[in-house]
Image: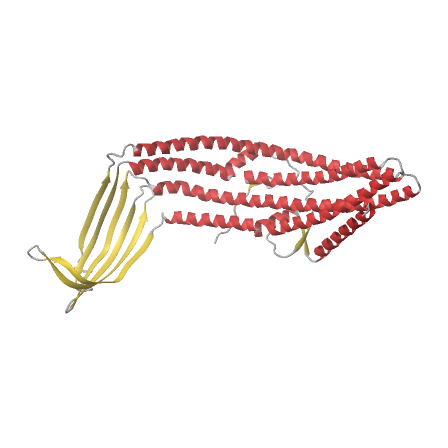
């Protein structure tokens, strides 16, 4: 196979790739998107956004569970019936035990209203109950025991108060979850921006390749005519033919890149149908500079990390309190006062009830534990000091990160302006160089250099545009602040 035959086959393969790509594009629905539309759609319907909402919903119900601990709870306990039949031992009048067969049915109901006391860790309660016993012998006898009302308290003393620490930590955890959700949404915008520009740059490369194929085809035809007239050497003609083939190969690859990146963007945004995208380049960028001091201040005020550090400190303090409360002296007080009466008739069971009281103190004192309690307390204190050191370091790194990101964003703004000017100059230079080549003033080498610089400048401009918008959404994520509207990003998610 000679070189000409190989080149012919390659050109046929490229042509076939064009036809397949064109047919595929015609079979899909095309939608036009700006960058802002892409990010808005991603935040509404992308799988990543749905995952963020589910994580928030999980934290929402955890917060509801925590809040329920501080609300009154009403409980009904009932047993009906409880049948017991068999032989059991009972005391006789002379103090000995005897075995008799007995059968009885117990039924009971108890209604309890209780309220936790967050400040002390105890609880108060009000009960009302009724019990019925049916003794099944030759004749059935029935008796009732009523407790119309009983008021009581359970109070631990010098023990770990879970409710107290939950009230300090759980609101922070919920606030942290809300801010995490806002950061997740900004991360969705960052991801959508990157995929948007992946496809946009692929489309730009495709357009560049199309123009290069058209230019190289024209130049090859001109060079072929000059070669036939003996004005250029065969080497220059072959170089022009090679440039044409290379541009056609690049065009085929860029078609594939566009389809691949469109597939990535479509999947991320949650579209199931076959779509193609006409992307509008976001060349109109906000004309402002970020005040570094404002960025740092807003990050400290709004970002999840700040609340997370506060929560970690409180949790370390809680573990110290837990180790002290669970490994030292502790006591529990239980006291009730109520009314009760037993009778053989339901109508009499609530008449003139008698008072009844119960009071109990339980004490637990560690005497010999081989230093276990002291070791656990010291471990908790050591962990608290470690957390404090880590929090201080992370707070410093946090401020440095915000500062650098804000400075970087401001630099990118000026770099974007330079890249736009470079692109304009490179396009003009190529047009002038091409015109000079056509009249024979320069050789093919200088033309190829101008062509390469044109393509590099075009790609460089859109890469800078990508960097700008990616930095824009990154800064929003790090500060949870809208620098255009000059207001913190609000939390508006509705949870059901």
Q: Residue furthest bottom?
A: 138
Q: Is residue 417 left or right of residue 186?
A: right
Q: Is residue 81 left or right of residue 430?
A: left
Name the residue rendered at 21%, 50% in the picture: 337
x, y percentage for residue 254?
72, 47
Looking at the picture, tell me which residue is in the foreground, 338 or 236: 236
Q: Is residue 346 left or right of residue 238?
A: left
To which quarter of the image does residue 98 belong? bottom left
x, y percentage for residue 87?
16, 61
Q: Residue furthest right?
A: 229
Looking at the picture, tell me which residue is in the foreground, 352 or 3: 3
Name the residue rendered at 76%, 51% in the picture: 13
x, y percentage for residue 80?
26, 62
Q: With respect to residue 354, does 325 lie above or below? A: above
Name the residue rendered at 58%, 32% in the picture: 404
Q: With respect to residue 82, does 355 lie above or below? A: above
Residue 279, visible in the rendered structure: no
To which quarter of the image does residue 366 belong? top left
x, y percentage for residue 116?
32, 47
Looking at the picture, tell me which residue is in the foreground, 54 or 85: 85
Q: With respect to residue 133, does 168 lie above or below? A: above
């Amino acid at each position: 196979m000679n070189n000409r035959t190989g080149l012919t086959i390659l050109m046929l393969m490229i042509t076939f790739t064009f036809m397949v790509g064109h047919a595929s594009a015609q079979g899909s629905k095309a939608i036009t998107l700006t960058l802002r539309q892409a990010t808005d759609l991603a935040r509404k319907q992308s799988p990543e956004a749905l995952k963020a909402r589910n994580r928030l919903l999980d934290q929402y119900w955890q917060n509801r569970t925590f809040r329920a601990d501080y609300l009154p709870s009403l409980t009904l306990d009932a047993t009906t019936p409880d049948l017991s039949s068999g032989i059991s031992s009972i005391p006789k009048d002379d103090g000995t035990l005897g075995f008799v067969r007995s059968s009885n049915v117990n039924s009971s109901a108890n209604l309890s209203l209780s309220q936790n006391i967050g400040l002390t860790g105890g609880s108060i309660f009000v009960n009302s109950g009724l019990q019925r016993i049916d003794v099944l012998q030759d004749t059935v006898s029935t008796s009732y025991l009523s407790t119309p009302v009983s008021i009581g308290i359970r109070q631990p003393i010098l023990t770990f108060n879970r409710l107290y620490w939950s009230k300090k930590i759980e609101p922070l955890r919920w606030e942290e979850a809300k801010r995490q959700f806002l950061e997740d949404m900004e991360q969705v915008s960052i991801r959508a921006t990157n995929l948007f520009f992946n496809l946009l740059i692929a489309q730009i490369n495709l357009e560049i390749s199309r123009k290069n194929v058209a230019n190289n085809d024209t130049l090859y035809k001109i060079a072929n005519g000059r070669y036939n007239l003996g004005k250029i050497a065969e080497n220059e003609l072959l170089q022009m033919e090679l440039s044409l083939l290379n541009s056609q190969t690049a065009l085929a690859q860029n078609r594939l890149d566009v389809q691949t990146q469109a597939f990535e963007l479509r999947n991320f945004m949650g579209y199931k149908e076959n779509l193609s995208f006409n992307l509008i380049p976001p060349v109109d960028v906000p004309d402002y500079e970020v005040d570094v001091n404002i960025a740092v201040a807003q990050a400290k005020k709004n970002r999840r990390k700040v609340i997370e550090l506060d929560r970690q400190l409180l949790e370390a303090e809680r573990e110290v309190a837990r180790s002290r409360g669970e490994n030292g002296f502790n006591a529990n007080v239980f006291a009730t006062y109520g009314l009760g009466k037993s009778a053989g008739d339901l109508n009499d069971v609530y008449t003139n009830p008698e008072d009844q009281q119960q009071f109990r103190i339980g004490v637990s004192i560690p005497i010999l534990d081989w230093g276990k309690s002291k070791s656990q307390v010291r471990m908790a204190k050591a962990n608290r000091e470690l957390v404090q050191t880590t929090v201080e370091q992370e707070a410093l790194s946090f401020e440095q990160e915000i500062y650098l990101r804000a400075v970087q964003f401001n630099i990118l703004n000026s770099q974007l302006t330079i890249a736009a000017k470079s692109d304009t100059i490179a396009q003009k230079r190529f047009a002038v160089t091409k015109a000079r080549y056509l009249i024979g003033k320069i050789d093919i080498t200088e033309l190829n250099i101008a062509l390469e610089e044109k393509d590099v400048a075009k790609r460089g401009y859109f890469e800078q545009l990508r960097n700008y918008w990616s930095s824009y959404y990154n800064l929003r994520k790090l500060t949870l602040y809208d620098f255009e509207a000059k207001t913190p990003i609000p939390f508006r998610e509705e949870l059901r």
